[in-house]
């Protein structure tokens, strides 16, 4: 009896040892052949949270750790694979040459399902609603359509010039640029009255608070529901973040709807002043947009245009201060073509001015990084590295523009380009 028990025990032990050996062999083979061992290089990751702490630092993407050695950098944002493109070659190869595969958006649950009810165009995934809203925005902002807004831009530019000339040296120029951007966008979108420098506009503050909440919620680490989507099923009475988010969505929707209703009332009263909101309301059957979709589509233009316009003006001003000879050349062209008796208009052909405006885009970008795009499927990338499906991809714009290879010395414009009244911009190039 004892011998039988011993033989059974030895037999079971042998089976366990064989099973353990097979498991170790299988695990080792899986580890050796796993594509996850060939991820793109990146900084050291912590367990569970990955590189979340580094991503929370707004200046980290411009730091030495980010700049050196990582053309394509892999980060782990608390379980969300992320790729940062730190070279022009990589950014152009993926985001330009393969644009069709990188046109979607990642799932930020707090933004899409709570704060905006999936109505905010920049955060929508590629689908039927996104195509309808994008088409409506494109048709209302074509080159021919934006000519209707030239008087608004001229008026706001004149107000800005007068304000800058009459203000003291201690005046905050950024505030002036922000006023111009906010007033211009609100006038174009809602036919809103001109905002003055001294005006404390409550509507503008509420819109900016709305988009500040969106920017905060559009990061994986800001709300746990972005990392654990199943938390959306928690009842509101047990989830304060959900209850507050839905309340804010209701208030924001009512605010944007009130702005669009102003345009609706003006149209009913016979107003023929052009605005983006009017173009949406006048073609409901063509655009096939519901009232909530039109409401948020009009509102999102403030997000798209206000901050970027003000930032672009600030960078342009810095460029002109940093390169005074360029500023003198532009002023000389203005004097030669227009003179001192009137202001320039959109009808004037100013080649050098066009060049300075275009060169600003290579001087500095309005945003620190590009919008993010999820990788549609697992794939091999540069030099055989592996990129998991669902990886978020972004271009590190400020880093790309601050690289030494991008900071080129200015080429003097040759004497054969001295005719500033020419209507052609060919040959003009400012390498700031």
Image (spheres, rainbow, N blue to C red):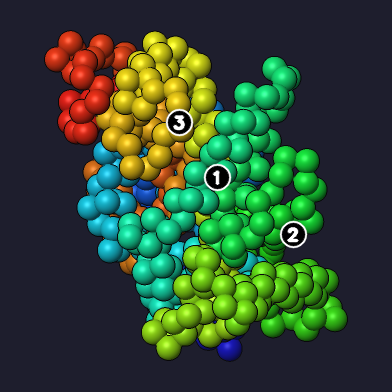
Residue found at the far right of this picture: 237
> What residue is shown at x 65% (from left), y 31% (from top)?
163
Residue 10 vs 354, above or below: the answer is below
- Residue 188 in sight from this viewpoint: yes
**For residue 332, which quarter of the picture?**
top left
Q: Can residue 368 be seen in this view?
A: no
Identify the element where label 1 is drawn: helix
* Residue labelled with disc 3: 342
* Along the viewing direction, whichever of 151 and 45 lies nearer the viewer: 151
**Residue 26 location (% of width, % of height):** 36, 65
Q: Name the residue under label 2.
A: 203
The tag earlier along the polypeptide, 3 or 2, is 2
| Mark-to-mark CA distance, 1 and 2 | 21 Å
Position of residue 239 in the picture relative to residue 140 (left or right):
right
Percent x, y for residue 347?
33, 42
Residue with the mark numbered 1: 155
């Amino acid at each position: 009896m004892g011998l039988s028990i011993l033989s059974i025990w030895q037999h079971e032990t042998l089976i366990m040892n064989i099973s353990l050996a097979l498991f170790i062999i299988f695990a080792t083979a899986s580890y050796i052949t796993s594509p996850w061992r060939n991820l793109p290089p990146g900084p050291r990751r912590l367990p569970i949270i990955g590189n979340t702490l580094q991503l929370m630092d707004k200046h980290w993407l411009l730091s030495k750790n980010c700049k050196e050695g990582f053309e394509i950098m892999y980060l782990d944002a608390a379980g969300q694979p992320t790729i940062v493109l730190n070279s022009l070659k990589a950014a152009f190869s993926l985001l330009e040459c393969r644009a069709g595969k990188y046109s979607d958006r990642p799932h930020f649950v707090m933004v899409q399902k709570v704060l905006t009810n999936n109505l905010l165009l920049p955060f929508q995934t590629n689908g039927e609603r996104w195509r309808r809203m994008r088409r409506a925005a494109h048709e209302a902002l074509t080159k021919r359509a934006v000519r209707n807004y030239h008087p608004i831009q001229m008026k706001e530019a004149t107000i800005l010039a007068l304000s800058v000339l009459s203000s003291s040296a201690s005046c905050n120029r950024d505030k002036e640029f922000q006023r111009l951007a906010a007033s211009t966008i609100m006038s174009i979108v809602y036919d809103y009255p001109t905002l003055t420098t001294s005006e404390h506009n409550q509507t503008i503050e509420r819109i900016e608070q709305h988009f500040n909440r969106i920017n905060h919620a559009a990061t994986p680490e800001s709300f746990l529901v972005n990392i654990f989507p199943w938390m959306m099923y928690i009842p509101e009475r047990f989830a304060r973040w959900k209850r507050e988010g839905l309340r804010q969505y209701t208030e924001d929707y009512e605010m944007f709807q009130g702005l669009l209703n102003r345009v609706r009332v003006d149209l009913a009263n016979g107003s023929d002043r052009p605005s983006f909101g009017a173009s949406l309301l006048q073609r409901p059957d063509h655009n096939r947009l519901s009232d909530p979709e039109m409401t948020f589509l009009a509102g999102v233009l403030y997000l798209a245009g206000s901050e970027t316009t003000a930032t672009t003006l600030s960078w342009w001003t810095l460029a002109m201060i940093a390169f005074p000879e360029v500023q003198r050349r532009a002023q000389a062209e203005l004097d030669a073509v227009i003179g001192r008796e009137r202001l320039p208009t959109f009808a004037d052909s100013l080649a050098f001015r066009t060049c300075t405006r275009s060169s600003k885009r290579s001087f500095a970008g309005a945003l620190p990084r590009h919008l993010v795009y999820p990788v549609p499927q697992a794939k091999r990338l540069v030099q055989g590295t592996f990129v998991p499906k669902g990886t978020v991809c972004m271009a590190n714009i400020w880093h790309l523009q601050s690289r030494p290879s991008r900071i080129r010395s200015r080429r003097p414009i040759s004497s054969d380009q001295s005719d500033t009244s020419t209507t052609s911009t060919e040959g003009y190039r400012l390498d700031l």
